[in-house]
Image (spheres, rainbow, N blue to C red):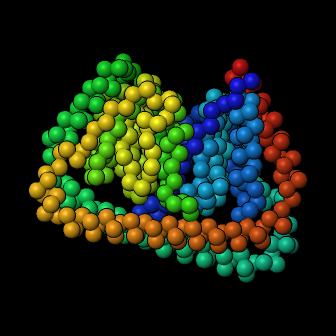
Amino acid sequence: MKKGKLRKVFPGGNTCSGFYSYYDYIIEPGATRIFVIKGGPGVGKSTFMRWIGEQMLEMGYDVEFHCCSSDNNSLDGIMIPAIKVAMLDGTAPHVVDPKNPGAVDEIIHLGDFWDEGKLRKYKKEIMACNTRVGRLFKTAYSQLAEAKIINDELNSYFDEALNYAQVNGVIHEIAKSIISQTETQFEKEPKDRHLFATAFTPAGHTHHLDTILQDVSSIYLIKGSASSTGSYIVGTLTHALHMHGLDTEVFHCALEPKKADLVIIPSIKTAVLKEIPGINFNPQEADNIERVKTYYTNNFLNPETLAMYSKEIKNCSERLQSAIKRAISYIAAAKKEHDVMEEYYIPAMNFEAINARRDEILKRILGYAQEFK
């Protein structure tokens, strides 16, 4: 049996607005089953989901791993598209509760498998860890808020130098090219899905673009110093394509979660991707990408205006990187503190009983899968 394809995305991110969630887009309405997993740190939520996902991959099902932006080794959820089944971490900061209890959603509480007596012995230490983690994330978010202010200043210099008529010409050209490959679909409401392709994590600015774009064969790549121009192009195109009736997957900026870095049009295996600062990804090197058409937005910048603000641009770029670096250091410190907290929970867990529950859930998922055959 051929192994299924694994796709990795981020459903939430550490942003200038704090923790920002696109959890509602992990699975579309009308799901077969949504398992919401509750429990403390170190109780095995991520391991539980990962094991289920890996088993389904081995059986030939494509699976999405929804990665945690605050822990590079953890999952916030998994989704199995072919059978419309998802498992979600329902604990803070991405609190999830059943919307259709019993009919669609149910809670798996791993707290049923811990020794309360062992945990109460470390009540003071656990509460102190929680307080420290909260403080570290608050500081990280203040650094990202500062980074956003600096980024706004940086982009203001590029905006002053930018010829927007030429940029809009690029948008028109790409939109015309994409729409010419599709059929207008106004008889149904187009679907739009929103997630993150990159995130600020304890290990730095991380991406999974190679897996996100594995089914894409054609890319329009927007390159240039003015990152906001790339977001403007991708965002405007997303709106235009949606208006044309096309389903889209939109992947948002790690710093500014309402801005777009990438839009995929699944029906024609096509994407529009902007060059993302801090991310090293070259689509030309991907085996599945057959065509990359590149647009250089620096060609639309007035060199005299850029020269006039050269010192300010250099200063902003340095301050921006420094603020992001500080934010990542605090996210990493929060991860270390969270690891300490896990050490109190792990010895208190009955993992044998959790594994038995996990095996039971897998059997149920395979039962749902039979309904699709």
Q: Nearer the viewer, residue 281 or 345?
A: 281
Write the residue at 74% across / 33% down: 58
Write the residue at 71% across / 71% down: 341
Q: Residue 110, image x and y in percent?
A: 78, 56
In the rendered image of this protein, does residue 183 appear above or below residue 107? above
Instruction: Report which quarter residue 366 is drawn in.
Output: top right
Q: Nearer the viewer, residue 64 or 94?
A: 64
Tag count: 0
Write the residue at 28% across / 31% down: 174
Asked whether the viewer can see residue 243, the reply is no
User: Is residue 97 toward the left or the right of residue 265 in the image?
Assistant: right
Instruction: Report which quarter residue 360 is drawn in.
Output: top right
Q: Nearer the viewer, residue 303 or 327?
A: 303
In the rendered image of this protein, does residue 216 appear above or below residue 343? above
Q: Residue 130, image x and y in percent?
A: 64, 73
Q: Residue 118, image x and y in percent?
A: 85, 72
Q: Residue 17, image x and y in percent?
A: 42, 62
Write the residue at 62% across / 37% down: 6
Q: Nearer the viewer, residue 211 or 148?
A: 211
User: Is residue 340 toward the left or the right of residue 23 in the image?
Assistant: right
Which quadrant holds the N terminus? Answer: top right
Which quadrant holds the C terminus? Answer: top right
